[in-house]
Amino acid sequence: MAEPLPRRMRVEEFLAFEGEADVRYELVDGEIRAMAPAGDRHGWLAGNVGYVLRRRLAGRGCGVVHEAGVRIDDHNFFVADLVVQCTPPSGRPFVEAPRLVVEILSPSTRQHDRDVKLDAYRALSPVEEIWLVDSERRRVQQWIREGPRDWHVRDVIGTGTFDSPVLAATVSLDELYEGIAFAEETEADGSGAADGDA
């Protein structure tokens, strides 16, 4: 006789789960997963990105939420490093209409952020733009929605810049990575961007 499949936790139950006070959690396919603590470079980058977002959004009725809860579906609830929302805060434990989502890629989160969270964010209709900001080298992968299921991806490296539709502004890697040095940086890294479609 086959064993019954384990019951998957729903988001409502997850939001009532308390866990340990100093640990952040996500719900992935109905299973609670503890998140590794962020390192200092991760935190510094998140601060830089948040500052850039706030400056570009000033006076536009949009705000930046750090460590934002994002409800994907009934069994998935993620914590994004930063989210831009253009609706007033509701007091709910998640951002209801995220327009731009930023994930800082760290060694411990890189695979999950790229393989699982990216696809989940792309499936959310309010999301118009996603930034994957690398914490190990100067590189941002920018995803821009071009239709219900069509996305354009751009890799920006070194001292490159990119245009953000949500911010209606140009962003430089110099400002995102201000104050952060990488031991492996060389002249060979160059600068610029490569475009593609997904």
Image (tube, rainbow, N blue to C red):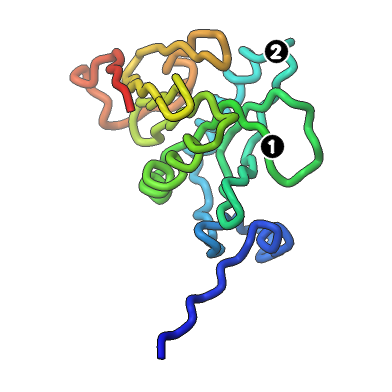
Give residue 14's quadrant in the image.
bottom right
Q: Please give the residue where the numbered disc 2 appears in the rendered image.
A: 58
Residue type at numbered disc 2: Ala
Q: Residue furthest right?
A: 91
Other residues around mark 1 within 10 Å, as few (<14) / some (14–19) / many (≥20):
some
Other residues around mark 2 within 10 Å, as few (<14) / some (14–19) / many (≥20):
few
Q: Please give the residue where the numbered disc 1 appears in the rendered image.
A: 96
Residue under the point 64% across and 40% down: 68
Mark carried by residue 64: none
User: Considering depth in this image, is 24 or 143 the residue closer to the camera?
Assistant: 143
Residue under the point 64% across and 44% down: 69
Residue under the point 43% across and 44% down: 113
| Residue 18 place in picture, x, y as percent | 71, 64
Looking at the image, tell me whether mark 1 or mark 2 is earlier in sequence order: 2
| Residue 131 place in picture, x, y as percent | 46, 28
Element class at badge 2: loop
User: Considering depth in this image, is 78 or 64 the residue closer to the camera?
Assistant: 78
